Image: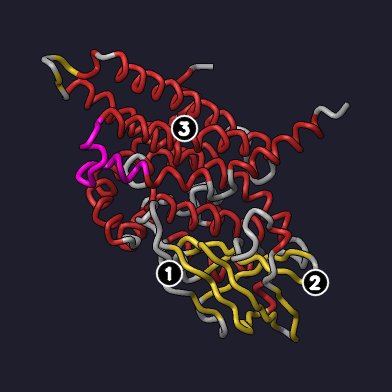
Amino acid sequence: MNYEKLFNPTDEHQALREMVADFTRAEVEPQAAEFDAKGVLNVDLFRKLGELGLLGITIPEEGGGAGMDAVAAVIAHHELSKSDPGFCLAYLAHSMLFVNNFYWASNDEQRGRYLEKTISGEWIGGMGMTEPGAGTDVIGMTTTAVKDGDSYVLNGTKTYITNGCEGYVFLVYAKTGDRITAFIVDRDCPGFSTSHHIDKLGMRGSTMSELIFEDCRIPASNLLGKEGGGLTHMMRNLEIERLTLAAMSVGIADRCVEIMVRHGQERHTFGQPINQYGQIQRYIADGYAMTEAAKCLVYNVARDVGPDVHNRIGSDAAKLFAAPVGKMVADYAMQVMGGSGYCREYPVERLWRDAKLLEIGGGTLEAHQKNLTKDLARLHRI
């Protein structure tokens, strides 16, 4: 296979990459440090993603989306994360965790109510799965939904929810009896509220809060699919979530390699560029090799992920490998830059902080190891 064709399989993918890269350089990069310092989402800029057609990137054209595939989603997250992973995380929570998940789980009536305004960015969306006592252990969630006439009544709390502060609509998982079921909850539902902003180390260009349900009453028509079907929706969407999170790590690593290469040429000590020293050469060369390996794995897996194509082995492997690469290459870049890399004047310290989340969010490294071991044993059962 042509190496470049792996990353840009079609002219359409190439055009998408160029568009997102141009937008990222022109509009995302200049605001990244400011909104990281503020710890808030740049909502006006976020809505420009809707104008570019990126908020419904995986939604069929007949549904009002761009009609593109998982490779396209990877491209968008890869390019945006080179400048502002926090902003990109808000994009992922909206476009993947809400819009993509919602579309493939919803009916025409539900799409008519929510799809247009979320694809445009007028309404910001998110997903509620993690709870104070149940993260990776989704079966242990305690949020409940009880049918009451033509409504469901939800009680419980979700935590660490990206876009919780700005979001209008959320795809929420709750238990009906002992089974997990998916619902749509929006700000107009009585008994629904969000907590204060939860401050965090990195990914500060997006916000995080709790979703609180206190006898929250939602219409029965907000049930997604059927009672007990939520786990199926969740598992299907986790694959593209993990893949795009891995793409974010690749974006961070890509930018850090670029920074190391440039700094290695420009910075002089003892009368020569620092890239003449073996220690610096190791960071640059190893960082590049690791980044390219992660990139190849992520894009290769992306070819085999879709709403009707299940590839948990691939998506778990991609994130398991790529997430530590982003953190390690950011660490290399900071080492190459020395004291300047540690200062907020330069982007490396922000990328370094942002990278850690990718080893935790969307499934911990340990969860991926567990999934892979179980799935591989099943695949190669003796």
Tell me the SS state at disc 3.
helix
Q: Quadrant of the C terminus?
A: top right
Q: Which mark is residue 325?
A: 3
Residue matched to label 1: 165
Tell me the SS state at disc 2.
loop
Q: Earlier in the sequence, mark 1 or mark 2?
A: 1
Residue 250 locus on image (x, y percent): 44, 34
Q: Residue at x 39, y 63 (%)?
A: 199
Callout 3–callout 1 Cβ contact below 8 Å:
no
Task: Look at label 3 and name its amino acid.
Answer: Val
Residue 70 locus on image (x, y percent): 55, 40
**346 and 246: which is toward the camera:** 346
Residue matched to label 2: 177
Q: Residues within 10 Å of mark 1 (few under 14, many from 20)?
A: many
Q: Which mark is residue 54?
A: none
Tell me the SS state at disc 1.
loop
Q: Earlier in the sequence, mark 3 or mark 1?
A: 1
Q: Earlier in the sequence, mark 2 or mark 3?
A: 2
Callout 2–callout 3 Cβ contact below 8 Å:
no
Q: Residue at x 37, y 35 (%)?
A: 330
- Residue lying at the far left in this picture: please name it: 271
Query: What span is in magenta?
Result: 337-352
Compute the Cα span from label 1 to label 2.
Answer: 29 Å
Callout 1–callout 2 Cβ contact below 8 Å:
no
- Residue lying at the far right in this picture: please name it: 382
